[in-house]
Amino acid sequence: MGKDVQPQFSKQTTFEVFRYQLVVDKTLPINLFQKYETADQVRADKNNIFQQVVAKEDFNFKGSNSELTSKFLYSDGTMSYFRLGVKRSTTLYSKDLSPHSEENYPNIIIAFNNDPTVQKIAIQTNTAAFKETNIVSNIIQETLENELKDYNLSFYTEPIYDTQEFWNLVKKYPKQIKQLTFDLISPNMANITKNLQLNLKQLYEDTNTHKTKVELNADNESYLEIKEESKFVNSLVKYSADGGGNIFMKVAGKRKLLHTAQSPEEFDIDKNLLEDIDWDKLNEKFKNILI
């Protein structure tokens, strides 16, 4: 009798999804490289500027807290892929059981979709390299903020998450919410602001604000009534969850502010696809997911 054949399960690796926005600083001199004369011209070309920056031969991710190494992998115009590693020391043991340290660079893949209607980043999870993906998001923001400032562009990135995370917290702490703060990025993507009931774009045009804070505070002896049927609150929650900002909640009896974006949107990729990479196949897969 033949042996049972066990099914072969492919190993998966997880990517978490972030949104980035490119906001023009209108107060700085605009005549950049004798090409742009107005903020509108920079704004119209912002994604081309971004693509030129990340495609530079000497482009590398930089972090102030760790020794990093990065490598450009592939680009098809709107999609760009990088590998990012971080220096770690690993203790190994010789045959005589004596320890010795060796350098190791555990790493991850980062994918950008620079379509102006998308502007998303997929960050591979690997706790051997980075404990959390928001550490990588901060590295990306620090690097690109520095690279894009010469073009009068500010770079912001935030996780994309399910709005239900926010409403679950509201339900968890009935009659206990003392303060609710929406830290919102000035938008440059019409498709994520269509239902926003706060004219952030006009505020930006009038004042050059890049971040706007909407803070709701209850009286000392009272609490906030946060209702799911509120169109205004829902619009702020949806915009934030789409990668447009942060939400912080102060709850009675808790010393720390609660942050609603605890679980960014994620997807899985077969690890085999990331080893012997067929870029046509892998790129098509990412383009179909990262939309």
Image: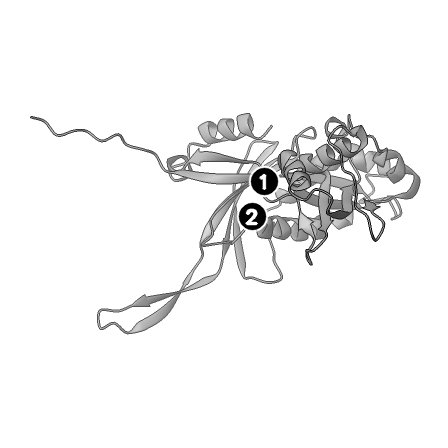
Left or right: 218 in relation to 250: right
Taking the spot 84% from the left edge, 33% from the top edge, the residue there is 198
Q: Quadrant of residue 270?
A: top left
Disc 2 target residue: 133
Q: Residue at x 34, y 71 (%)?
A: 100
First in sequence: mark 1 or mark 2? 2
Tell me the quadrant of the picture where the N terminus can be found.
top left
Horizontal and vertical percent position of residue 112: 59, 37
Compared across the picture, whether 232 is left or right of 285 comes to: right
Q: Residues within 10 Å of mark 2 (few under 14, many from 20)?
A: many
- Residue occupying the far right of the picture: 206
Q: Position of residue 83 (x, y in %)?
A: 50, 46
Residue 245 is drawn in which quadrant? top right
Secondary element type, mark 2: helix
Q: Of circles 1 and 2, which is in front? A: 1
- Label 1 secondary element: loop
The quarter of the picture where the C terminus appears is top right
Q: Residue 101: x, y in percent?
A: 38, 69
| Residues under numbered marks 1 and 2 in contact, where contact means CB atoms less than 8 Å apart | yes
Q: CA distance from mark 1 to mark 2?
A: 9 Å
| Residue named by callout 1 | 264
Answer yes or no: is residue 188 visible: no
Task: Using the image, determine if residue 159 lies above or below residue 8.
Answer: below
Measured along the vertical axis of the image, is residue 217 above or below residue 277? below
Amino acid type shown at disc 1 = Pro
